[in-house]
Image: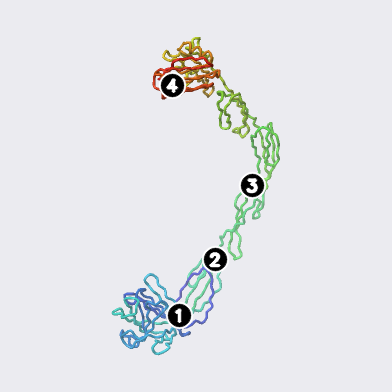
Amino acid sequence: MRHLITLFLTLSLTTTTALAQILTGSASNLGNENIDLTVSVDVTNNSVTLTMEGPSNKWFGVGFGSSSISMSGAYTLHASHSTFQMNERAHGGNGSGTTLSSSGAVTNDATSGNRRTLVFTRSRVGPTNNYYTFPSAAGSISIIWAYGNNLNYSYHGGNRGRTTLTLSEPCPPATEVTLPVISICDGQSVDVFGASVNFSGLFTDTILSSTGCDSVIQFQEVIANSSSALTDLGSISICQGESTTIFGNSENTAGIYRDTQTNSAGCDSVIQVELVVNPTYDLNETVQICSGDDYTFPDGSTQTNIVTSTTYTSSLSTGAGCDSLITTIVNPLSVISSDVMEEVCFGSDYVTANINLTNLTADTTVVRTYTASAGCDSTVTYTIMVFEQAVSISANAENTEATIDPIIGIPVLWQWFDCASNTAIAGEDMGSYAIPSDVTSIEVSIQGSFPIGNDTCVAVSNCVMLMNDTSTAIAELSAIGIHIFPNPSIADLSIINQEERLVEVTITDIIGQVVYQGVSNENMLINTSTWSEGAYSVTLDVDGTRQSLQVIKR
């Protein structure tokens, strides 16, 4: 007898029961389409299961009861275009044969890729002599096979053949025997079915019969108990300065301690325990707080409104239950305060990250509180001084030159302006302005720019009328508060009526044609942009008195 030894990781017990008698056989790769056939005969239950596999795009079939390709006396089964249907036929010779009634049922019909598999179950014994009766004992049977060119059952041509299929009975169940468990210690070995074993496991020994079937299966479990296995008992904690007993000895040094003992299996066993020595503490710390703040010490006590340096000792217990002292020195930080002085122009804005003052017309004080680098309050007082400078100009006795009253001690950039058009007079940036000889009259003002702090202030003066025309009309009109400018005129002609007298104005060109006429007791602005260049006569009737003068349009 032959023996087969196998290692299993788990122990299993099997109870042997009577099994049905089954005969099986198969034939594979029949023809170019590789038809496969498996026959399973259940003699006990008198049934047969046929499994056929072939092409999915062609009909294919197998036959029983004939060893000749002529198919005389053959019983055939064909798989064609219909699904879950097996076509059964009886043949007396060559030809398509006679269709038989179905003697069973197709229990599976599946297609995968270009392959089709059918499972057909029927009775072992045919219902008539036209059906094949499968044998009830092991042996060989002849089969024939064929396939067509498509799914429609038709003449197969040369796509046919024959072969032999052998039916055989499986081996009977073997007897299983479970042997007593063997225990060994680490380093030992034991003979198991002729092999030396020094580790745990489930081993099997199979005894084969003369027919090659399993006869007896023996199970042997071996348990190897480790003599060097380490058992960790965990840890023991003490405080610094204390001691404890470990394996009969007094110990006070942190570390791992081991002892060798005999376990329940009779093998050596090593056990260990760790000794943890937790420290005690005597610590010093220094902290800073803002003056007047409260402080909570490590033991939870709180002192309020601390304004001088304070020392306090906290008595605590660590997480391991050991004593701990913490001495805390608390130093309060003083509040920081500062002043900031700024100058701005009258009507200007003062804007910072957290100050937004607009249109300042008077000195202003703002207090802001910030957080210093140590986290304490820092107070800053901002004083914003508003600088206002009035500028005035006056004309000389002849009304031909205007001068300014300068801003003493401050550098100023001056610029003279034409009041009528509010435009800068090119090149006039000195302390006085004289009317050009080719200008009859003009009203001017001065504008000065000067630095104040980070700002640049602008002061604008009053307007003053300057005239080259010393005629009686100009003088008399000026005496009653009426001024006409600019002369020459480019785009507009202004008539200033300071005393709001009723004035009737008539303007004619050189040929006497009226280009403007109006009456008002207010200032008048006459658009001359469309007039032709040349001389124009202006007649003013003021309170019944008529005055005439000439203006030039350029």
Residue most toward the bottom?
129
Rendered image: mark on residue 514: 4
Badge 3 or badge 2: first in the primary sequence: 2
Q: Which residue is mark 1?
A: 171
User: Amino acid under label 1?
Assistant: Cys
User: Amino acid under label 3?
Assistant: Asn
Badge 1 or badge 3: first in the primary sequence: 1
Badge 3 or badge 4: first in the primary sequence: 3
Distance Cα–Cα, label 1 vs label 3:
72 Å
Quick one: label 2, few (<14), some, or many (20+) residues within 10 Å? many
User: Amino acid under label 4?
Assistant: Val
Residue most toward the top?
397
Badge 1 or badge 2: first in the primary sequence: 1
Distance Cα–Cα, label 3 vs label 2:
40 Å
Q: Quadrant of the N terminus?
A: bottom left
Rendered image: mark on residue 278: 3
Rendered image: mark on residue 224: 2
Badge 1 or badge 4: first in the primary sequence: 1
On screen, residue 200 above or below 75: above
Q: Position of residue 321 (x, y in %)?
A: 68, 47
Q: Secondary structure at mark 4?
A: strand
Q: Position of residue 526 (x, y in %)?
A: 47, 23
Is 259 left or right of 137, judged from the image as shown? right
